[in-house]
Every structure is written in structure tokens, then in C-alpha cells.
Amino acid sequence: MSRKHRFESDAFDYTFDRFVGTDPERLAGYRAALARAELAMMIYEHRKAAGLTQAALAKRIGTTASVISRLEDADYDGHSLGTLRRIAAALGQRLEIRFVPREVRQAKAKRPKKPRGRRAVA
């Protein structure tokens, strides 16, 4: 049996439906929190892949290690485009910003009913 993605579980679905559901304000908050967490994780993963400490990356972009620590915090909401560009350049990357269509959360698909009677032999 293949392992489910961490965001594809009955427990996550239940929690999401219970606390976020279809409320537009809560859904917007969830999406914003998820975007912050993903951005923080990207900065962290690219920094680690480059073999840099927070202090070393900070030195490359002309700031302090505490700023890098804040940028890698999922709760931080003050990312600036300039800082992200400097980080990308220091890591030998380029920053790409895109607009993508919003995903519509669909109800979980119901399992198909088992056929009744005898099975056809092919």
C-alpha cells in the first residue's frame, strides 16, 4: 500500500472541514498561513542545500543571522521582494513569481460501489 501524503489523511480532512470548512475568511487565513510556511521552508531547504548556515547566508546578503531565522519562520509575514531576490542570488538561484489558478477544494470522492452478482471473466 502506498503511503499517503501528509496532507491526505482522514484526520487532516476532518480537522480541515471542522475548523476551516468553506468559511471564506478562515479559508483565506489557511491559504496565507500555508503560503508563509511554504516560503519559509523553501528558504530553509535552499540554504541547507547550498551548505550555508544562517550566519553565512546573512553575510552574503548583508544582514544578520536573526533576519534569516525570522525569514525561515512559518509565522513571519514580512518578506520583502528585495530580500527574497538577494537570497536567491546568494544561493545561485533566480526568484520566480507566478500567478496560478486557485484550486477549488472538492469534497472527497466517494468510493465506487462494489458490483453485485457474478464477476465477468475476461
Image (spheres, grey):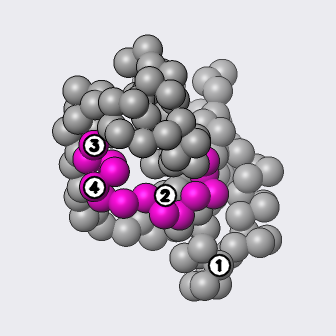
Label annotation for residue 86? 3
Q: How crowded is mark 4: few (under 14 residues within 10 Å), some or many (20 or more)?
A: few
Please, what secondary structure does the residue beneath circle 2 have?
Answer: helix
Q: Residue pushed farthest bottom?
A: 24
- For the residue pair 119 and 94, the one nearer the viewer reads as 94
Please, what secondary structure does the residue beneath circle 3 have?
Answer: helix
Alpha carbon separation for disc pair 3 and 4: 6 Å
Q: What residue type is labelled 1?
A: Arg
Q: What residue type is labelled 2?
A: Ala
Q: How crowded is mark 3: few (under 14 residues within 10 Å), some or many (20 or more)?
A: some
Vertical side of 16 occupied by 112: above or below: above
Alpha carbon separation for disc pair 3 and 1: 33 Å
Quarter holding the N terminus? top right
Q: Which amino acid does label 3 sit on?
A: Arg
Please, what secondary structure does the residue beneath circle 1 have?
Answer: helix
Alpha carbon separation for disc pair 4 and 2: 18 Å
| Residue occupying the point 35% across, 39% down | 62
First reached walking from the N terminus: tag 3 or tag 2: 2
| Residue occupying the point 43% across, 14% down | 51
Where residue 33 sits in the image (x, y, percent)? 58, 62
Q: What residue type is labelled 4?
A: Gly
Q: What stretch is highlighted in magenta?
A: 72-86
Q: Residue under circle 2?
A: 35
- For the residue pair 24 and 111, the one nearer the viewer reads as 24
- Whether residue 34 is visible here, answered yes or no, is no
Cβ atoms at labels 4 and 2 below 8 Å apart: no
First reached walking from the N terminus: tag 3 or tag 1: 1
Vertical side of 20 occupied by 99: above or below: above
Alpha carbon separation for disc pair 4 and 1: 29 Å
Quarter holding the C terminus? top left
Q: Residue under circle 4?
A: 82
Cβ atoms at labels 2 and 1 below 8 Å apart: no
